[in-house]
Structure formats: C-alpha cells, structure tokens
Image: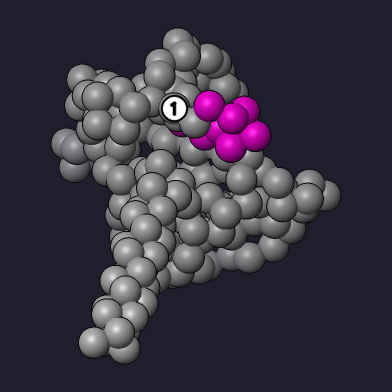
Amino acid sequence: GDDVSFFMTVMIKKYLFAGVLLLMGMTCRAQSLSLEELQGLTGMTTDQVHNFLIINKGFKPLGKIMLNGKSFDRFKSNRVDPATAETLSLGQSNQLMSGNTTRQVIYQTQRFQDLNSLYTQAKRSTMTLIFEGRDAYQNIYRFDNSLFTTVINVNLDKRSGTVQLDEK
C-alpha cells in the first residue's frame, strides 16, 4: 500500500513538473514573430499589418520614421524590459511587376537568442545561405530563394541585430 502511494506521488510530481516546463517553454518562446510571419508581413496590406501586429501579437505602434529616404511604420513588442524589446519597421507597400503588393520588413532585437532562432529558421527554410561574412560591426548572413531575400545582421558583441526581409 505505502509503496504504491509513494510511487503514484512521485509519478504525479514528475508529470506536473514536465507540464510546468512545457508551459514555460511555450511562454518563453524566443522571438515574438517567426521568420514565416515576418515573410508574411511583406505582402500584407496596411490594415492587415495593423490587425496582425496590434491585435494578434500585442505590438504597439510607434509612428513613422525615415530610413535612407524611405518612410517606415514602426512597431514595438509588448516586452516590458528594454533589454529584450523588439522593434519592427515596415516600409510603404509597392506593387511588383507580378501585381503583388510588397513592403520591406526590418526586425530589430536586443537579444541574441531572437536572432539565433530566426537564423536557425532561415537555415531550415527553403532559402539558401548565399553569403556569410562580416564587417567592422557585425556578422552578415544573406539568405535567398525565388520569393525572398533575407539578411540577418548580428552585432559582433552578439547583443543585438537586425533581420531585413524583401520580397522579390
């Protein structure tokens, strides 16, 4: 009797612990947006972008910013700690020769884990790593396929970086 109840107590504790770990893993996901979601943003209308980022993902609009003479809408993740904040800059939509609408997407993060996760997703995707190099400030990884060009820049201190996506 006592051996069975002890065994059952140990098993219940193990399963509860595993459940807690699983739940923590789900809430501690690396970055707020997957590479596939970032790619999806390139073809969304402005209304779709706002609905997806603000309603579905909890991002907050920060207004417009000019980068290299181009206007971008900026959004910030709902992470409270500035050291883990993510920023998304979305260029104005343009029409491609195919008739599709596209926009440039630039994702910025202060966490190496976010960049590493997106790099791993890019390696596992249909994109091919076509360039790997570095300059004085960052490691540069350029991925490409028939639909997208993705450039991942990781600052040499591995504390921050960007992911830039362009639809072809």
The residue indicated by pointer 1 is 78
Residue 145 seen:
no
38, 109: nearer the viewer: 109
Residue at left offset 64%, top offset 56%? 140
What amino acid is labelled 1 in the image? Asn
Disc 1 is placed on an element classified as loop
- State how many labels appear: 1
- Quarter placement of the N terminus: bottom left
Q: Quadrant of residue 90?
A: top left
| Residue at the outermost front position | 1
The relative height of residue 60 versus residue 154 in the rendered view (above or below) is above
Residue 137 at x, y percent in the picture: 78, 47
Q: Is residue 75 left or right of residue 108?
A: left
Residue 17 at x, y percent in the picture: 39, 65
Residue 139 at x, y percent in the picture: 70, 56
Q: Is residue 17 left or right of residue 107?
A: left
| Residue at the outermost top position | 63
User: Is 108 contained in the magenta span?
Assistant: no
108, 106: nearer the viewer: 108
Q: Quadrant of residue 78?
A: top left
Q: Which residues are magenta?
A: 80-88
Disc 1 crowd, CA 10 A, few/some/many (<14, 14-19, 20+) = some
The relative height of residue 108 versus residue 66 in the rendered view (above or below) is below
Residue 54 at x, y percent in the picture: 30, 23
Residue 9 seen:
yes
Residue at left offset 27%, top offset 80%? 5
| Residue at the outermost right position | 136
Q: Is residue 72 left or right of residue 26?
A: right
The relative height of residue 128 versus residue 28 in the rendered view (above or below) is below
